[in-house]
Amino acid sequence: MAEYLTVEQALAAVLAGVDVLGAETVALTEALGRVLAQPIIAQDSLPPFANSSMDGYALQAADSQSAAPEQPVTLRVIGDIAAGHFPELTIVPGTAARITTGAPLPPGADAVIPVEATNERWREKTRPQPGQVEIYQPVQPGDYVRYPGEDIQAGQRVIETGHQLRPQEIGVLASLGMSWVQVVKRPRVGILATGDELIDVDEPLTPGKIRNSNGYAQQAQVMALGAIPIPLGVARDHEEDVRAKLRAGLAAGVDLFISSAGVSVGAYDVVKAVLEQEGAMGFWRVRMRPGKPLAYGRYKGVPYLGLPGNPVSAMVSFERFARPAILKMGGRKTWTRPQVAAVVQEEIHSDGRESYLRAIVRREDDHYIVVTTGSQGSHIMTSLVQANALLIVPEGVTFVAAGATLTALMLDWPETVF
Ligand code: AMP
Ligand code: MG
């Protein structure tokens, strides 16, 4: 059993132990936020046909070359082309056809003149077509025409596997006629809290008890990643209870177990014992602060991450280890938070472990500054509530002077900062 891994070593081991889940097919309307399990290859070109980008007149550009406001060119209007209808007419020299935005360019035409540059300032598309139109300025071949394939060519690879679908990708998929899409399954994450002291959120406090906050915070962390939390409740500090809850998780088909507490060296730390007996224990100490104890292994083949019990340690460990693992399982190609270089506004003392200090990053002129949010005790949740970042004090560093620059891991990307 390896002891005292660096954060980097521990993360590498966690990531090596999880695989991308399989694919499932979902309706396009359910696909927002999902991760592609297939590359998107265009079946059609976009636009599919040459069409007008303006309300105006389709014409031959050559006819318009001498046009000016004081010397308009008059063309005979031979038809009216509305969006959604394919024109049966052909433009020949001296003629034009009224055309609306998105309507197919008729044969013979090579340009469109916007209605604003004619004597027909029509807005009403249903108005009877005029017999002729005066145009006030020249256009060049291709003006106000959108050509087929300008956006996407049939056969083109448009979006890669692993891409998370945003509204703009949904729009592209709709344009390409994909009403169903193959996405990576959402990881099902079993969440177990352990400890004799824990009561549920709706129970009254009694002496010696605290409410199970980790279970709820972790469900929220899992949901924030687009994964599915499977709450397994609270296991008392008995191996049998831990086992029973983990079996319930197996029955619910979890892809990953996350527990909190029960992984340090105290006599009641039962998670370690259960994993050692019925699964596989990888490591359990990481040189980081907060969050030194970390159980990593498998329970009956399912990857298992045992996070520390202290609420802040649990959240930071989740950030550093569970989040990347869940994103990898969910098919994402990158799993790091945005990071910025920020100028520290205070002296910082550290114990040489890689430290994650709760902090607020702000923008000042052309750079970022960072201040820590008061008490860094691993039970002080309010300093995490105030924080928008985790400030990283690297391994081996025990003192940071005010004015030095450190890396901050952005938990949020608030408008007030950027
Ligand atoms: P342990 O890892 O069991 O030594 O727990 C470390 C600290 O975290 C103790 O103060 C526990 O009471 C606290 N703790 C453990 N589990 C939870 C939880 N689910 N919610 C809030 N605090 C917890
Ligand atoms: Mg405990």
Image (cartoon, helix red, strand yellow):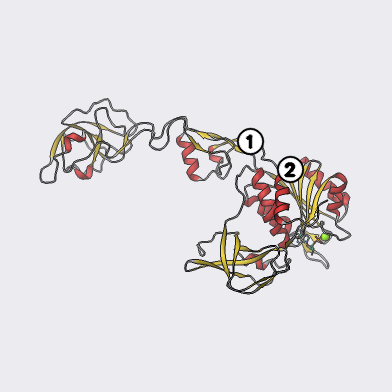
Q: Residue at x 17, y 34 (%)?
A: 63
Q: Position of residue 391 (x, y in %)?
A: 63, 64
Q: Residue at x 14, y 44 (%)?
A: 68
| Amino acid type for the residue under numbered disc 1 | Ala
Instruction: Using residue 142 as the reference point, say whether residue 72 is left or right of it.
Output: left
Looking at the image, the residue that sits furthest to the left is 71
What residue is pinned by disc 1?
Answer: 23
Q: Position of residue 109 (x, y in %)?
A: 24, 31
Q: Residue at x 79, y 45 (%)?
A: 298
Would you place residue 52 above or below residue 33 in this image? Answer: above
Task: Name the one closer to the observer, 203 or 19.
Answer: 19
| Amino acid type for the residue under numbered disc 2 | Val
Instruction: Using residue 347 as the reference point, say whether residue 83 is left or right of it.
Output: left
Quadrant for residue 384, please give it.
bottom right
The quadrant where ligand 2 appears is: bottom right
Quadrant for residue 128, please give it.
top left
Q: What element does badge 2 sit on?
A: loop
Local packing at callout 1 (Cα closer than 10 Å; few below 14, some 14-19, many 20+) is: some
Q: Nearer the viewer, mark 2 or mark 1?
A: 1
Badge 2 or badge 1: first in the primary sequence: 1
Task: Name the one closer to the observer, 21 or 292.
Answer: 292
Q: What element does badge 1 sit on?
A: strand
Q: Position of residue 189 (x, y in %)?
A: 71, 47
Would you place residue 394 above or below residue 248 in this image? Answer: below
User: Does ligand 1 reach within 8 Å of label 2's beta carbon?
Assistant: no
Q: Is residue 230 visible?
A: no
Would you place residue 253 above or below residue 215 in this image? Answer: above
What residue is pinned by disc 2?
Answer: 254
Q: Position of residue 143 (x, y in %)?
A: 27, 39
Q: Is residue 116 visible?
A: yes
Instruction: Using residue 297 as the reference point, say whether residue 139 is left or right of it.
Output: left
